[in-house]
Amino acid sequence: MFFLYQLILTIIILISPALIVFRILKNKEHRYRYKEKFGFYSKRRVDGKLIWFHGASVGEILSIIPLVKNYEKDKNINQILITSSTLSSSKIIKKFKFKKTIHQFYPLDHIFITQKFLKYWKPNVSIYTESEVWPSMFNELDRKKIPLILINSRITKKSFGRWQIFSNFANQVFGKISLALPQNQETLKYLKSLKVKNIKIAGNLKYYGQENNKDQVTKSLKNKFKNFKVWCAASTHGDEEILIGKLHKRLKNREKKIITIIIPRHVNRTNSIIDTLNNLNLNCVKHSSNRKLKKNTDIYLVDSYGESSRFYSLTNICFVGGSIVNHGGQNPLEPARLGNYIINGPNVKNFKEIYTFLNSLKISSSTSNILKMEKKILRILKTKNNNRNIKKIIKIGNDVLKKNLLYINRYLI
């Protein structure tokens, strides 16, 4: 099975020039740094101890930032390498201005490229997030006796079913993991079935985040929205913006000075979203335009990554997307932690345990009915935040971070 896997990757590499050009034209690949995926690196490895984190894209990278910040202060760590697969995630890391942390794109999982990667970077420990499982790299890490930790690991029923098609191969791959820290009970069960030897419970890292920062929002942003009532629709996917646009029109019939802030899951969709909303006769302003808001402004579209918390802090209610379309939901914890009541659609299987927790605190509700959403938003906008619930989420997050650091540090001695 491993031979077949390598053969498929070899074919992909042979046709990759055409794929790379296509992705560059689509703004999904860096014009120069794509070479890192083939083992040609743009940063150098410094002497001393190196800790390596890998996350697929924006969500996974944001979840490891608290760990990275901790190791930035650790004098025993000389360099921190973060790898990811998407252009958007590389842009996120730039915003933090770390001193000893660098970013490179994750290499293709071909045996020769993975060997070259490890020979160059020589990590003292490798830390993968969520669903990132790469057979060739795992095999090489095991061969070189480099500890492999899978943090905040998440395996869905669907992905587990796929691994079970090649159960012997799957057991070999997962058997290379030195330590797995599952984010939920479902993943714990699947990791055991996949023969992971060392599993510890640390909780979901996505509970962790900065405390309520309503007072830390920039004065200019506060002033921008001071004459309006504001609510957010975050992590929206295709078709959800149509519903949000129609919902905004209903809200504006009741509340003339309301603005809907839309934070799409993928900002490269910005122009198509604006076209969709313009077709609904809605007046849109892009965040990047720095335009002044007018009385007739309907939608404020956030077309940049890494700024969501600033906008959650302007309101107390947020719709979290990926939940009306059949995607499985997006993480609602950041807006909830910043004092937002959460509205979501019915499709939240990827965050089932988190939504159950938020429901138990009575700070979320599920509906795809536009009339119910309208009533809920208008009512919540008139209420105050429940600080007790915010403190509960923050406490859980702090405990999860401490546990993750405790388990990781055992491999850094």
Image: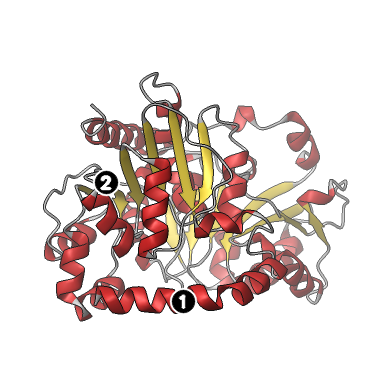
- Residue 248 position, x and y percent, is 70, 64
| Residue type of the residue flagged with mark 1 | Asn
* Among the two numbered marks 1 and 2 on one chain, the one whose residue lies closer to the N terminus: 2
Q: Nearer the viewer, mark 1 or mark 2?
A: 2
- Residue 299 position, x and y percent, is 75, 59
Instruction: Provide the residue designation for mark 1.
Output: 326
Camera-nearest residue between 219 and 411: 411
Left or right of 115 on screen, residue 274: right
Left or right of 227 on screen, residue 337: left
- Location of residue 168 by image quarter: bottom left
| Residue type of the residue flagged with mark 2 | Ile
Find the distance from the CA under tag 1 to the CA under tag 2. 31 Å
- Residue 235 position, x and y percent, is 56, 59
The secondary structure type at the circle numbered 1 is loop
Camera-nearest residue between 116 and 108: 116
Q: Residue at x 71, y 31 (%)?
A: 218
Count of marks overlaid on the render? 2
The secondary structure type at the circle numbered 2 is strand
Crowding around mark 1 (Cα neighbors within 10 Å: few <14, some 14 to 19, many 20+) is few
Crowding around mark 2 (Cα neighbors within 10 Å: few <14, some 14 to 19, many 20+) is many
- The answer to whether 38 is drawn above or below residue 392 in the figure is below
Quadrant location, the C terminus: top left
Quadrant location, the N terminus: bottom left
Is residue 245 visible from the viewing direction of this image? yes
Name the outermost residue toward the top. Answer: 75
Instruction: Provide the residue designation for mark 2.
Output: 149
